[in-house]
Image (cartoon, rainbow, N blue to C red):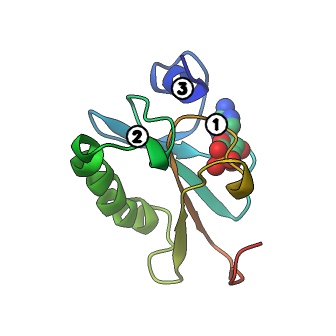
Amino acid sequence: MTIFQKIARREIPADIIYEEEDFFAFRDIHPQAPVHVLIVPKRVIPRIGDAQPGDAELLGRMIVASKEIAAKLGVIESGYRLVINHGPDAGESVPHLHLHLLGGRAMAWPPG
Ligand code: AMP
């Protein structure tokens, strides 16, 4: 079981701020911005490169829900960034697909 599955099952504490039947969102334990939330499917897709056509609807709903989460956290007007890290060069550290929602400060482009 992944750490994010344990959070979904409330076996590990986290600040859960949004939940649907098949995905949820909680604050990152090491925030990289004033707002840093992870949006996570409850079933494990290890990383975006492992996603299958059958995952498209779920992933689409997660992306659409990000605007509701951004609004709830007060960054819909100031702006926010969605990030998915796949593999070592991207800095992936948890093998359970997640969208980072980052906001609350101006961010550089290109990313480091
Ligand atoms: P990534 O490097 O893209 O795989 O992102 C994994 C993220 O999960 C990192 O930003 C971590 O800070 C975050 N993280 C790891 N463990 C926890 C936890 N128990 N609660 C909240 N966030 C976590």
Q: Residues within 10 Å of mark 2 (few under 14, many from 20)?
A: many
The Cα–Cα distance between marks 1 and 3, rounded to whole angstroms, is 13 Å
Residue 19 in the image: above or below residue 64: above
Does label 2 point to a residue whose CB lies under 8 Å from ligand 1?
Answer: no
Question: In this orientation, which residue lies closer to the viewer: 20 or 89?
Answer: 89
Identity, as a three-letter code, of the amino acid under mark 3: Ile
Mark 2, mark 1: which one is toward the viewer?
1
Q: Can I make out residue 81 in this image? A: yes
Looking at the rendered structure, the secondary structure element under dot 2 is: strand
Identity, as a three-letter code, of the amino acid under mark 2: Phe
Whole-percent x, y for residue 64 in the image: 30, 62
Query: Looking at the image, in which quadrant does ligand 1 appear?
Result: top right
Q: Mark 2 points at which residue?
A: 24
Q: Name the residue under label 1.
A: 94
Residue occupying image coordinates x 36% and y 67%: 67
Q: Name the residue under label 3.
A: 7
Residue occupying image coordinates x 69% and y 79%: 107
Q: Is residue 65 left or right of residue 69?
A: left
Does label 1 point to a residue whose CB lies under 8 Å from ligand 1?
Answer: yes
Q: Is residue 107 left or right of residue 41?
A: right
Whole-percent x, y for residue 51 in the image: 38, 44
Whole-percent x, y for residue 71 in the image: 41, 68
Does label 3 point to a residue whose CB lies under 8 Å from ligand 1?
Answer: yes
Identity, as a three-letter code, of the amino acid under mark 1: Val
